[in-house]
Structures are given as C-alpha cells and as structure tokens.
Image (cartoon, coloured by chain):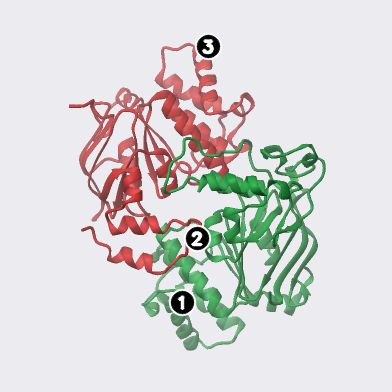
Amino acid sequence: MTVPVLEVDRLVVDVLVEGEPRTVLHEVSLSLGEGEALGLVGESGSGKSMTARAVARLLPPGARTSGTIRYGGHDVRTLKGGALRDYRGDVALVFQDPRAHVNPVRRIGDFMTEALRTLHGVDKHTAAKRAAAALADVGIADGERRLEQYPHELSGGLLQRVVIATMLLTEPKLLLADEPTTALDVTTQAEVMAILDELRQERGMALLFITHDLDLAGAVCDRTAVMYAGQIVETRESAKLHEDPLHPYTAALVTARPAVDRAVDRLAAIPGRSVSAFEAPDGCPFAPRCPHAVDACHQERPPAEYVDGGLVRCIRADELRGRLAEEVAFHD
Amino acid sequence: MTEEPVLRVTGLRREFGGVVAVDGVDFEIPRGGSLAIVGESGSGKSTVANMVVGLCAPTAGTITACGRDRSRPARSAKERRLRGREVQIVFQDPYASLDPRHCAEQTLDEVLRLHRADDGKQQRQARVAELGDLVGLDARQMRARPRALSGGQRQRIAIARALAAEPEVIILDESVAALDVLVQAQVLNLLADIRERTGVSYLLISHDLGVVRQITDETVVMRRGRIIERGPTADVLAHPRQPYTQVLRDSVPHAGWKPTRALRALTEGAQPS
C-alpha cells in the first residue's frame, strides 16, 4: 500500500445536544491511500456523515474531538489560517442533495468557476473554458449552453454531475462523497458512480464514499468499513463482505436486503433498532440485537482485531466465521 | 368470468398544462392481490397513485374500486367516506405524513370516529389497541408523539392509520424507501403478514426492484406516462422483454456489480419495440 493520504486514528467526537455533550464517534480509525477508495457504510445515526464532517473540519460548533486526523503529515484538527485554506483546497465534498448545495439564483457557470477565479486567480474566459471541459468529462456534451443556465433548469442527475465536475476543477486530492447518488434514479446512479470511479482512477484521487448501500460501496471501493453506533465494527476488502463477513452486524445488513432475483417467505429482520453512540450500552453496542451474543459481549467494548486482512470488533469473530458465511450464502 | 377485480383502471390519462403525465394506463388488481408500478422519476407512477386515491382527477379514463366508479371527484362527505373505506394510501416520508400534535392513539381514533361512527368509546379503544398490535407498536409508543418515535415506528403508525378504515386496497407510494435496511426488512415482513391476515390488496409504487420482488405478484413498468411492460413480477424481473426494463434491472447494485456510463445512454435509445 502507498503512503496514506488520510489517516484517522482513534477519533472520538462529542457534539452538544441541548447543551449536553453527546458522543457520536467512538475510536474511529481508518486510512486512505492515494487513488484508493474506501466505502463507509451504515444506517442513519451510525456516524458515517459525522466522520466525513470531522475530516472536512465541518463539525458543528461546540464539538470536541480527540484522537488524530492526519493529512500530509499534519493534524487536520489543529490547522489554522493559510494551512487550513490550503487543506480545504485539496479536499472536495459532494453531498446527497445537489439542489441544497448550489445557489439557486446564480448561473451554473458562476457556481462552477467561483473557486477557480477567487482562489486560483484564473481569468473569466479561461475558467469558463475549463468548466465546459469538466462538464464534458462527466458526460455533459453541451457544456457551454449549460453554463448559462440556472440550477432549476437542470434535473437532479444533471445537477449532481455539475457539482462533481465543479469539485474536479480544483483538482482535489481527496474527495468526500456523502450519499452522492441517493436522490437519483437507479440508471442515473449507475452513470454517476461510473464517472466517480473513472475520475478517481485517472487522477489518482483518494475517495471516501459514504452510503447506506453495501452493494453500491462494493462496486467502487476496494475496501469497505461498516459503522454501527459511532464505531467501525468491520473494515474489509469489499468483495469479501458479502461472502465471508466477520461481524454479525455486517451479516445482518447483507441478509436483510430483499433481492431482485428471488422473494423469500420472511426477510431476516433482526429485532430492535439501531442506536447512536451515546445511547449504546456498555459492552458491544450491537450485543442487545445480536443473535450470536453471549454474556461476555455485554461486559466490555470489543477491541479492533485483525482477522484475515480485515479489522473487526467482535470477540467471537474467529468462532463465528463459518456460521456467518453460511447465513449470507443462504441469502445469495 | 372470474371474480370482479378489487381495483380496475382503464384508459387513464392526466395532463398538466400541455404535458401528458399519464397516458392510456390500464391495469387491474384481483381481490387480495399485490401489484407494483415500477418506474423512474417522471414516469407518472405517483400521479397514477394520486388519481386512484382521489388526490387528483383524471383528464380521461375510469377508475373502479370495489365495483364502484371513482373517476370523478366525490360530491359529498358521505361519498368521500365511502371511498375512504375502499382505498387508503401510505406515503414515503414518515416524518411529514403525521400530525406532530397527535399520538398514534389519537390519530387512529380520529379515523375510527369517521369510519365507524356507530362504535362507542370502548369499542374504539379496543380497535385502536388491536391495530397497534397488528403493526407491532407497544402501549408506550401508541401514546408518544411522532417526534419521540423513529422513522420505522412512524411508518407503522401510517400503516395502522391506513388499516383503520378497513380499506380493500392500500397504496404504498414508496412507503419503505426512506427506511434503513434493517427497519425496511421489518416493515416489509409486517406488510406481508397484514396482507395474509386481512386479505387487503396492495398497489406498490416503487423504484426499488428488490422491494417489488419481495411483496408483489404482478408488475407493470411505466416510462414517460405509458405502461411499456407487464406480467408476473418474477417473470418481468427475471426475463425482461423490453430493453428499458433490462436496463433498470441491470442498474440495481448487487454483489460484483460494476457501474457503467453506457446503461443510461441505452435507455435514451431504448424505444418500446
């Protein structure tokens, strides 16, 4: 593996909820090499977006962090002034709803060239040319016409591609994509995902891809990290998550999803609901819902341990391996 | 001649200004059946749902539920209530579809007062408890305001509210799309149980082919306001005849799936043969 572009080590984040500090991330560790894609998968409230916000230095006011977020040898948490500005130039963000992200009363061209003109001092004409070329890269042929249009004249899929093209203009080294295709139709999603994947490979950009869909993450990410209750419970090669999951929660995610090619009598729905980090009980946060939990699971938080090239937080990971593989095989 | 279908739609058309949103849509659902309308944004699938439940009037065509015509807006409160006992709807967003000031018990009681006016207070209370049991909400959750409940719990209330009027047909307009996968599995199992126990029919509006496969028997595929393919769900998804349906099928992420740019270009070229 190459030198990591981004390295997060035992990151803990507390945010203020009604004046009270609440833990939303618990000892999150991940690393991302140049040109590598890492999927971050979890349900609402699992902490996946909070992880991206911490990396982007966009945590809400009053948030407290511990642990480290390293980028290019510096701790992102302590960057100030010019160094922070440079860092923000290197990191691009794409969110779920492109319409909430662009100014509705500015033309597409203004939105796309703002960073180039203000941060990089590129003149208006050159900036417009580069914007049109970037649109061509994401499959929008009539770029020059699009630059003159307003956001409301474009469909969601088109607008999301505009946002992606805009991010690429400043040639970021790290792209944080938070559910970038969730609001799109499936055929548009396939196209946007293909574009992201191509651009990452061509430009050697590191990608942190956040989604609730294990299969979608697997399609573009070399490795996938699964989050539950503010911690990463398993990090593994994406392809292996489906056939040989190490954590019972990963297995539950795989088997709960209805398949296109077959209906089952009952979906494997585990009881209870997902909790946030601050609601999690002592011990393994998944233990109250886990079909494989034993007494020891309720005692203390399982540490992250290496198993077969992956990292997992489950004290029974070794003994459960064959059984979880059977559960998901029965599903496939 | 077999039994009269519980819902029959013929030649349904809806225009908005000069735009034709729904064009010549026909389908029927047998009693206790479950039909999916599949399509992407702008295909007209939600407009069909809105016309069937009575939220917008068709430009042309007929809708018959339980043998009674409902193609034109109801002219009286009595007629509206009658129609409410035929078709109910559960919307996508469990956060927007409930009154924030009412707990589940009040929400359900309101429906019962309208639709079972002869029942006394005690009978209504018993029925509210029964509905709560049916959708798996405990006594505490039945008395909580929506803001204190999760998305899955709120969607259970919306389902219970639809069931309270004892309709023959429930329209599920992307009803599980906003739910997390483990919650979605619970709600899909619940919907299957309810259909088995009450014999209610479902009209599912969805873009999610996995959900469609799991809870429907028949499927129609809509594109640009028209139905382009129809048949038993298993057949349509396993052996799509139209190239567009094939593209929809291939766009669903699954293990080992690789996204391609070409798929969407194909849909532009894919004309119904």
Depth check, front residue: A26 or A221: A221
Disc 2 element: loop
Q: Secondary structure at mark 1?
A: helix
Mark 2 or mark 3, which is nearer the start of the sequence? Answer: 3
- Location of residue B48 by image quarter: top left
Could you confirm whether marks 3 and 1 are on the same chain?
no
Q: Nearer the viewer, residue B180 or B126?
A: B180
Looking at the rendered structure, the kind of residue marked 2 is Gly
Q: Give the residue at mark 2.
A: B256
Residues A35 and A44: in front is A35
Q: Chain of mark 3?
A: B
Between tags 3 and 2, which lies in front? 2
The answer to whether the residue labelled 2 contacts the one labelled 1, judged by CB atoms less than 8 Å apart, is: no
Q: Are marks 3 and 1 in contact (CB under 8 Å)?
A: no
Residue B105, position as x, y percentages in the image: 55, 24
Label 3: how many Cα within 10 Å (few below 14, some 14–19, many 20+): few
Residue type at numbered disc 3: Gln
* Res A109 label: 1
Q: Chain of mark 2?
A: B
Density class for disc 1 (Cα within 10 Å; few <14, some 14-19, many ≥20) is many
Spot occupied by residue A66 in the image (x, y as percentages of width and height): 81, 60
Chain shown in green: A
Q: Which residue is at 51% across, 37% downward?
A: B187
Q: Nearer the viewer, mark 3 or mark 1?
A: 3
The numbered disc on residue B122 is 3
- Residue B170, located in which quarter of the rendered image? top left
| Local secondary structure at mark 3 | helix
Alpha-carbon distance for marks 3 and 2?
A: 56 Å
Q: Is residue A28 above or below residue A136?
A: above
Measure the C-alpha gap from mark 2 to mark 1. Answer: 38 Å
Q: Is residue B23 above or below residue B148?
A: below
